């Protein structure tokens, strides 16, 4: 489990698509200082996707992805040098600062508009039709793993606003119109609707 409070960013160092095991892709990511204390088998959210650390080497970690992960998320489209948001899993007793984020991405949204204002950046994104019932004004949403509040909804578009700190410490400083982001809707809303 995660909170959507991004700890920093990492850089993709290597991508192997023809792996010798059953995974679809192996990806090596330099986690920098966020690799400290990480053990094989532990969970790390990369762009909001819960992945398992399978091999460690100093500040780098290898993660394996199966076909389901590459189909439902945008991780399969990453290139060497790509920047990813990092969040280590929640420990018992940690503060819950964002909202409950499972790292089980529901789909991919496309950024349609970025409005830069003096003290914030407003991002409009297209919500996949099958997820629209889970996206509510003032509700929680995770985009590339970042816990955000839905500001507005207009037809198939929704918006969030990011403060300068969030832009600075996440991969959103690299985002532009047309880019894809992983979207995870609020788990509480899913259970209520069910």
Image (cartoon, grey):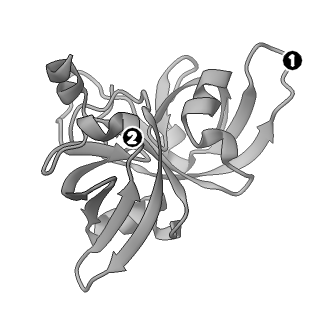
- Taking the image as shown, residue 55 lies to the left or right of residue 185, namely right
Q: Identify whether 112 is placed above or below 69.
A: below
Tell me which label, 1 or 2, sits earlier in the chain.
1
Q: Quadrant of the N terminus?
A: top left
On residue 104, the disc is: none
Instruction: Find residue 101 and report its horizontal and vertical position in percent.
Output: 31, 32
The residue wearing badge 2 is 129
- Taking the image as shown, residue 80 lies to the left or right of residue 186, namely right
- Taking the image as shown, residue 13 lies to the left or right of residue 93, namely right
Mark-to-mark CA distance, 1 and 2: 37 Å
Nearest to the observer: residue 124 or residue 64: 124
Q: Please, what secondary structure does the residue beneath circle 1 have?
A: loop
The residue wearing badge 1 is 20
The residue at the point 22 percent across, 80 percent down is 119
Q: Residue furthest front?
A: 155
Density class for disc 1 (Cα within 10 Å; few <14, some 14-19, many ≥20) is few
Q: Answer with the quarter of the image where residue 87 lies.
A: top left
Q: Identify whether 109 is placed above or below 48.
A: below
Instruction: Find residue 120 and report its horizontal and vertical position in percent.
Output: 25, 75
Q: Quadrant of the C terminus?
A: top left
* Res 121 seen here: yes
Q: Please, what secondary structure does the residue beneath circle 2 have?
A: helix
Nearest to the observer: residue 184 or residue 155: 155
Instruction: Find residue 150 and report its horizontal and vertical position in percent.
Output: 21, 53
The residue at the point 42 percent across, 32 percent down is 106
Which is more foreground, mark 1 or mark 2?
Answer: 2
Density class for disc 2 (Cα within 10 Å; few <14, some 14-19, many ≥20) is few
Nearest to the observer: residue 34 or residue 68: 68
């Amino acid at each position: 489990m995660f909170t959507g409070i991004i700890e920093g960013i990492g850089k993709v160092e290597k991508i192997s698509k023809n792996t010798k095991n059953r995974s679809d892709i192996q990806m090596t990511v330099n986690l920098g200082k966020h690799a400290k204390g990480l053990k094989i088998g532990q969970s790390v959210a990369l762009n909001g996707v819960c992945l398992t650390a399978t091999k460690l080497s100093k500040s780098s970690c290898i993660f394996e992805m199966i076909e389901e992960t590459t189909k439902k998320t945008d991780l399969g489209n990453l290139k060497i040098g790509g920047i990813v948001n990092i969040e280590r899993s929640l420990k018992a007793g940690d503060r819950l600062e964002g909202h409950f984020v499972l790292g089980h991405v529901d789909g991919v949204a496309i950024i349609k508009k970025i409005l830069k204002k003096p003290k914030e950046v407003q991002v409009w994104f297209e919500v996949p039709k099958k997820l629209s019932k889970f996206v509510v004004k003032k509700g929680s949403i995770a985009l590339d793993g970042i816990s955000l509040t839905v500001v507005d909804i207009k037809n198939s578009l929704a918006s969030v606003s990011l403060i300068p700190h969030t832009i600075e410490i996440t991969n959103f400083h690299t985002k532009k119109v047309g880019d894809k982001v992983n979207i995870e809707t609020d788990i509480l809303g899913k259970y209520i609707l069910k």
